[in-house]
Image: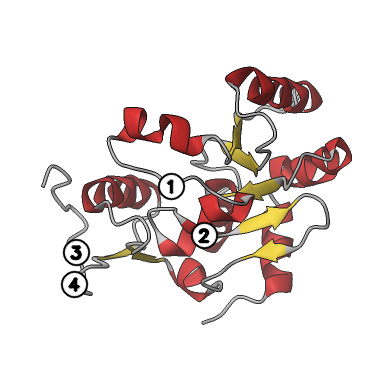
Amino acid sequence: MSLTEQQFFEFVRRNPVNAELLSRLRALQIPQGILTAGCLVQTVWNLKSGHDPQYGIKDYDIFYFDDSDLSWEAEDVVIRRVQQAVADLSAKVEIKNQARVHLWYKDKFGAEYPALQKAEDGIDRYLTLCTRVGIRLCDDSLYAPDGLDDMWNGILRLNSLNPQLELYLIKCTQYLQRWPWLTIVDGQTGAAAHHDADVRT
């Protein structure tokens, strides 16, 4: 089965937090601002599963890109602006400047990370292909380099641009605890993985 772009937007906006973020943050004119990741994909999974659209969503991710000032202080200014705009929402909203990720990624995750050139580059490096989805705040346009079919059908594949198998399996296992109908695929071998995959290996 497939999910059309129109259906995707309808599903996403049935989560009231997504709807408010898309409405409020456009006015802030955040450079290359884009709503992305779990808050979009997991809303769709929730509605397909018969859950409340906000079920199991840990945070709402906003990416942006501004390489004019790579200091933490500059990023913190944007974070504070966004937090002020959404302070009344009962949700955790995370804001990250994708121009800075390479400065801290190795210390946090133990792997090299290239300097990015645009906000979408951060989405391109997600561990799972089907979560590479975003909605640009400036014009509500969709960014989905892999399409929507795997996301709709719950197919989890390892991203060859960021092939960290252990982290991928950890994330997939966490997904399966909330949406057990998903299917893990080992992107290196193409073989289906057991749902109780040992993430220590």
| Tag 3–tag 2 contact (CB < 8 Å) | no
Q: Which colouring convention does the figure follow?
A: secondary structure
Between the C-alphas of marks 4 and 1, the distance is 25 Å
Q: Earlier in the sequence, mark 2 or mark 1?
A: 1
Seen in the picture, residue 71 relative to 178 is either above or below; the reply is above
Relative to 39, 27 lies left or right:
right
Q: Which residue was labeled with disc 4?
A: 189
Q: Which residue was labeled with disc 3?
A: 193
Q: Which residue was labeled with disc 1?
A: 114
Relative to 111, 84 lies left or right:
right
Seen in the picture, residue 184 relative to 60 is either above or below; the reply is below
Residue farthest to the bottom?
Answer: 1
Q: Amino acid at mark 3?
A: Ala
Between the C-alphas of marks 1 and 3, the distance is 29 Å
Residue plotted at (16% across, 53% down): 197
| Tag 1–tag 3 contact (CB < 8 Å) | no
Q: Which residue was labeled with disc 2?
A: 132
Seen in the picture, residue 5 relative to 83 is either above or below; the reply is below
Q: Residues within 10 Å of mark 4 (few under 14, many from 20)?
A: few
Seen in the picture, residue 116 relative to 68 is either above or below; the reply is below
**Dot 3: element:** loop
The answer to which image quadrant residue 72 occupies is top right
Q: Amino acid at mark 2?
A: Arg
Residue plotted at (29% across, 57% down): 163
Residue plotted at (45% across, 38% down): 102
